[in-house]
């Protein structure tokens, strides 16, 4: 294993630990808010409101890339020899689309299988997801290795929801 691969694993572990800390902090701060929601329809309604957070972040990334192209005169991205920072933002956009596309259906599935007294997760998950995407973007701007913590945090949110939903469906 190369030193870069080892560093990526360490940074990914840091991202996973950071995610655990963020989720713990959010759940402690929420202190059970919004309270037990036994009705699945009400949980879906709340989840759809909070789904605006990742969708809004994606929209912000799209707008940054679009405005940057407009301001720099790089209207045609196929003919553009973009500097590194703009290529980084375009890759952040592509990855954010991919991760958000995975997050949203898993989030809605999680909404359907959580118990009434687990409703605080409906707030914590999208907030943590957006924080992970911000960490990914900032880290990527620092350098390719810097993206690992944010990438790992977002990945583990999605993987955790997938595992949780499967476990609840089978259990």
Image (cartoon, rainbow, N blue to C red):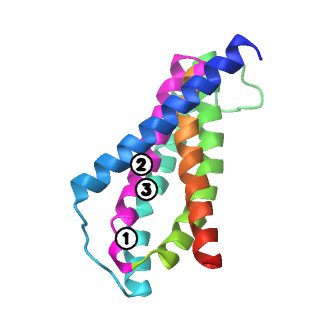
Residue at disc 2, secondary structure: helix
Vertical relation: 93 (above or below) 98:
above
Task: Using the image as rendered, state which of residue 21 and residue 150 is in the foreground.
Answer: 21
> CB of mark 2 within 8 Å of CB of mark 3?
yes
Q: Which residue is mark 3?
A: 126
In the rendered image, residue 105, in percent from the top left (x then y), is placed at: 59, 67
Q: Is residue 128 one of those drawn in magenta?
A: yes
- Residue under the image location 44 percent in, 42 percent down: 19
Circle on res. 20: none
Residue at disc 3, secondary structure: helix
Using residue 34 as the reference point, say whether residue 73 is left or right of it: right
Task: Using the image as rendered, state which of residue 12 and residue 133 is in the foreground.
Answer: 12
Counting residues from the start of the chain, the first of labels 1 and 3 encountered is 1
Measured in 3D between alpha carbons, the distance from the residue under mark 2 to the one under mark 3, in whole angstroms, is 5 Å
> CB of mark 2 within 8 Å of CB of mark 1?
no
Using residue 28 as the reference point, say whether residue 102 is left or right of it: right
Residue at disc 1, secondary structure: helix
- Residue under the image location 64 percent in, 69 percent down: 166
Q: Is residue 50 visible?
A: yes
Q: Which residue is mark 2?
A: 128
Vertical relation: 32 (above or below) 114:
above
């Amino acid at each position: 294993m190369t030193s870069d691969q080892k560093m990526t694993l360490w940074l990914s572990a840091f991202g996973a630990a950071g995610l655990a800390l963020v989720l713990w902090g959010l759940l402690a701060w929420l202190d059970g808010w919004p309270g037990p929601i036994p009705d699945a329809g009400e949980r879906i309604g709340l989840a759809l409101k909070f789904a605006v957070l990742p969708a809004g972040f994606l929209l912000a990334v799209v707008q940054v890339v679009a405005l940057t192209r407009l301001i720099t005169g790089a209207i045609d991205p196929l003919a553009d020899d973009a500097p590194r920072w703009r290529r980084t933002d375009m890759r952040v956009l592509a990855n954010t689309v991919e991760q958000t596309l995975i997050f949203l259906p898993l989030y809605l599935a999680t909404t359907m299988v959580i118990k009434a007294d687990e409703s605080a997760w409906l707030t914590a998950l999208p907030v943590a997801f957006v924080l992970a995407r911000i960490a990914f973007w900032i880290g990527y701007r620092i350098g390719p290795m810097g993206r690992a913590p944010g990438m790992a945090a977002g990945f583990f949110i999605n993987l955790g929801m997938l595992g949780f939903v499967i476990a609840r469906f089978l259990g």
